[in-house]
Image: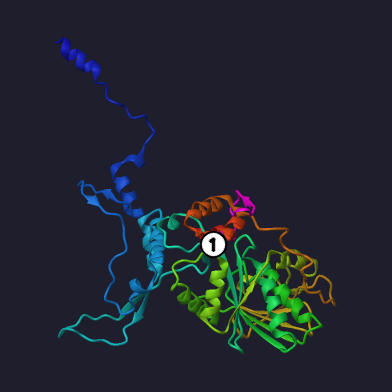
Amino acid sequence: MENRELAETAYKPRKRVSGIRNSENYKQNKIKKAKISGEAHKNHKGNDVASRQTGASCRCTLKCMELIPEDVLQSTLQFVNKFDSKNAQDTYLQTLIENIEIQRKRPRSEEPKKREFTFIYHIKIKGNLPLPNIPVQEVFYLRQLWLYEFCIYDLKTGKSVFYSYCEGVANNGPNEVGTFVLDYIKKNIGNDAEELHLFSDGCAGQNRNHAMIRILLSLVADQSNNIKEIQYYIPKRGHSFLPNDRMFGTVKRHIQKNDRIYTPTEYENLIAEANENFEIRQAKTEDIIDIKKWWPTYYKKLVLSVDSYGRGVPKDKKVTFAISKVSHFTLSKTTPGLVTTRESIDCLVSHDFQLLQRMGTRPPLPSNNTPTYAGKVPINEKKMADLKKLEKYIPAEYQTFYAEVFSWPTTSVSNEYHENQDD
C-alpha cells in the first residue's frame, strides 16, 4: 500500500501549457521540412531517406546532364531546396515547363495513345560572373564577388563591346548604363550616324527609366553631333530575342571550358577569346557619371501629354507620362525635350510629352565632373566575410587582387543592386 502511494506521488504527468504549441517539434512537421529542403531523414516507418541529389542522365538527345557543369546543377538544386513549401517548389518548376506540338507522330502500337503536346524544360542561369569560380563544395554555401558585364552590340558592324567592372567598383543601375551608352556613342559612332535605332530589354533599374530617356533627349538635342533622330525600342518580354543574348551565350560556352577562374582579368581574356568581334573596356569608379542627380535640373518627371492640357479635356482622358507602359520612344533634334511614346512598337496610337523644365533650351550632356561615387562602393560585410573564407583556396599569384578587395569598405546594409544577385 505504501509502495503504491509512493509510485503515485512520484509520477506526475506533464501538463501542456494552454495556448502554446511547439509544432516545429512534431515528427510529421520535421519529416515534411526535411523532404522540402532535400535533407537526409527518417520517414514515418523509421527507414532512412537519402538527401536529394540530381538523377542520372536521361535518353534525351539534348544531354543536359552532360553539358551543364556540375556547379550549375548543384546551385540549381540548392535554389529549389530553399523554397518554404512543396507548393512553392511545384509552382516554380511549372514555370520552367513549356508545352509544344508534336512535329512527328510515330505510333509504336496499332492503337496509339493520342498525344498532342510534348514539353521543353528550361533552366534559369544567372548572367553575372562569380569570383572566385572554383570547383569547391564550400562555394555553394557562400556569397561570391560579382563581375558585371554590360554588352552593346552593333547590328551594322556585327561587333560587340563589353563594359567590364567588379562589384565594389560601381553598382548596376541607370548611372552605369547611361555612362556606357554615352561612351559607346562617342567612341564608336561619333558623327557618322544621323539616325539611331536602339534596342534593349525592359529592366526598370537599368534601361526603362527616367535617367535613360533624359540622356537620349540631351544626346539628340546636342548640336555637336549629326544625330537627327533616335528610335528607342523595348520589345515585349517573352516575344523577343536580342542579339546580346546570343553574345552572352557564346561567352558562357567558352567560360564553361575553364573550371578555375580567380580574377576579372582572366574572365575578360576569355570573353575576348570567345569571338574576334568582342572588345573589352574596363570601367572605373571615377568614370561613372551621376545621371540621376543631373537630369532633374533640366527635365520634369511627371507631365501630361501635349493633348491632355486644357479644361476641355476630361480628367479620365488625360494621359500621364508612364514609362513602364511604353515600348517605343521617338526623339528628334528639331523638337528638343519632346518625346513621342507608343505602347507597342510602331503602334498607330502615340502621345507627345514635353519634358523640358525651360522651353527653348538644349540641356548639355552630363560630364565626368559630376561622378557618382567618391570612392569604392561598400560591399556587404557578410559577403566580405564569406570571401575571406575562400582565401585559402586562392593560389599565391592571385592573392594581390583579393588583398585589395579585402581593403575595400563594407556596410551592414544590403545593397539593392548586389544582394539581389545572391537571393
**Crowding near the residue tagged with mark 1, few <14, some 14–19, many ≥20 C-alpha atoms within 10 Å:** few
Whether residue 320 is visible, yes or no, is no
**What is the tally of numbered marks visible in this picture?**
1
Residue marked by disc 1: 397
Q: Quadrant of residue 82?
A: bottom left
Residue 365 image offset from top left, x and y in percent: 78, 74
Q: Residue at x 36, y 42 (%)?
A: 24
Of residue 320 and residue 422, the one placed in the foreground of this image is 422
The answer to if 234 sits in the magenta stretch is no
Determine whether the residue tagged by mark 1 lies in a helix, strand or loop: helix
The image shows residue 14, relative to residue 322, as above or below, that is: above
Of residue 374 and residue 269, the one placed in the foreground of this image is 269
Residue 127 image offset from top left, x and y in percent: 51, 69
Q: Quadrant of residue 295?
A: bottom right
Of residue 222 and residue 273, the one placed in the foreground of this image is 273
Quarter of the figure with the N terminus: top left
* Amino acid beneath label 1: Glu
The answer to if 414 sits in the magenta stretch is yes
Residue 382 image offset from top left, x and y in percent: 54, 50
Whether residue 187 is visible, yes or no, is yes
Q: Is residue 390 left or right of residue 283?
A: left
Residue 102 image offset from top left, x and y in percent: 31, 84
- Magenta segment: 406-418
